[in-house]
Image (cartoon, helix red, strand yellow):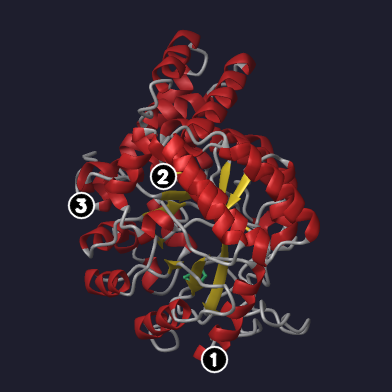
Amino acid sequence: MYDPASGRAEEFINHQEIQDSIQYAKENKHNRKLIESLLVKARDLKGLNHREALLLLECEEQDLVERMFHLAQEIKQRFYGNRIVMFAPLYLSNYCVNGCTYCPYHARNRHIARKKLTQEEIRREVIALQDMGHKRLALETGEDPVNAPLEYVLESIETIYGIHHKNGSIRRVNVNIAATTVENYRKLKDAGIGTYILFQETYHKEHYEELHPAGPKHDYAYHTEAMDRAMTGGIDDVGIGVLFGLNHYRYDFTGLLMHAEHLEAAFGVGPHTISLPRIRNADDIDASAFTDAVSDELFARITAVIRIAVPYTGMIISTRESRKTREKVLKLGVSQLSGGSRTTVGGYAEEEPAEENSAQFDVSDTRTLDEVVNWLLELEMIPSFCTACYREGRTGDRFMKLVKSGQIANCCQPNALMTLKEYLMDYASEDTRRKGELLIEKELKKVSSDRIREIAERNLKEIEHGKRDFRF
Ligand code: SF4
């Protein structure tokens, strides 16, 4: 039976409820009155449930689809303004005992280069990332209790937080590692992680088991209930996602929103972020072999409807996507972007030799961080290196309250501008600096509180004189 508050995967991601929702959306996709009423309801910014959202996604009436895109843009502006939070992935190890059929790290792949960074190598990678200007990392590892146990991840986090090179520091480490126990999540929380990220890949149990034929990840319920254990272990901010292309999008889109509803119902706070990866080619993986590909057009609609359904949740897009696709979905709701990424184990301090390949997927957007920042500035968006909420303890429901209060303009906006200023002073090319200064001048006017704007102006001057790390 469907029960969003249940702790059992089969009840909060209930197969029958998903099938019924798909049927409901198909039956009503030409019901203009109903769809219009949902668009009106969504204007209240309280979101939509999975069934309502699927109906919007299913709608083919062109004028209504256009209204959806406009609404998504409005919601994005209302809660996130034109700020885009920047981050980079850091792959620590690609040893893996699982058999995922879409990932080149699967245990049976004998020709991929297997690597695990030593603490000294991590230091070099982090210094290279700091020298690019990054302040926020997402750590990635395959699942291997011998080669990359939790202790290794904890030690690596400590190493990363301890590195301060010139004006650089990593201020928030998000972690994307395999599903684990409450006790281990508690240890990750104690190590000071930001968001714990785990993709479901697909919510369809049967397909999930086929796609994960071997290893601990084969256990659908253990994987699907991981966020419950993470939250029980004290982690407030969790990030969910599916790998679009593995399974039919309607099913996974619905499951994704049901997962968000479950976290809200069971823990009082939904996911901090939703990631939107699409399957890509990699070492021995041919993405075209997966027949449920999501077109660019559909991908944009999925982004827009998720923005409408969960207005307060951050949305992430990686360098799996091309510049063109990223540009389109940025406007529709995406709030976090990776830049200058390497998906190899290491590769920031030194390029991986051509004969080796330890990458998890081929990168589509290969631009440097400065090129991405420059491009965002041209689009009149604010690249933000802010990590203030996490460092001020505004996580979980405290973060959500801030977003819902609308005070974000007096908090995130000046924080974004101050961290951008740091980037411009320390790392930017001349052209990027010039564009960034103009944008800061313009965007500062949008801080509605006179007091906060004055403090921000003062801090921006202090940054010019060498001071760092101001935040509201
Ligand atoms: S997706 Fe994760 S668990 Fe699966 S093979 Fe790749 S690294 Fe291992």
- Mark 1 vs mark 2, foreground winner is 1
Q: Residue tagged by mark 3? A: 7
Residue 205 x %, y %? 38, 53
**Secondary element type, mark 3:** loop
Q: Is residue 371 left or right of residue 407?
A: right
Q: Amino acid at mark 3?
A: Gly
Q: Residue tagged by mark 1? A: 120
Residue 314 x %, y %? 46, 46
Q: Residue at x 27, y 49 (%)?
A: 10
Picture quadrant of residue 389: bottom left
Query: Viewer-proximal residue, 462 or 303?
Result: 462
Residue 71 x %, y %? 53, 24
Residue 315 visible within the image: no
Work out whether mark 3 precedes mark 1 in sequence or the reverse, and give the earlier one.
3
Q: Residues within 10 Å of mark 1 (few under 14, many from 20)?
A: few
Q: Residue at x 52, y 51 (%)?
A: 458
Picture quadrant of residue 237: bottom left
Q: Residues within 10 Å of mark 3 (few under 14, many from 20)?
A: some
Q: Is residue 68 above or below residue 386?
A: above
Q: Residue tagged by mark 2? A: 256
Cα–Cα span, label 3 and label 1: 41 Å
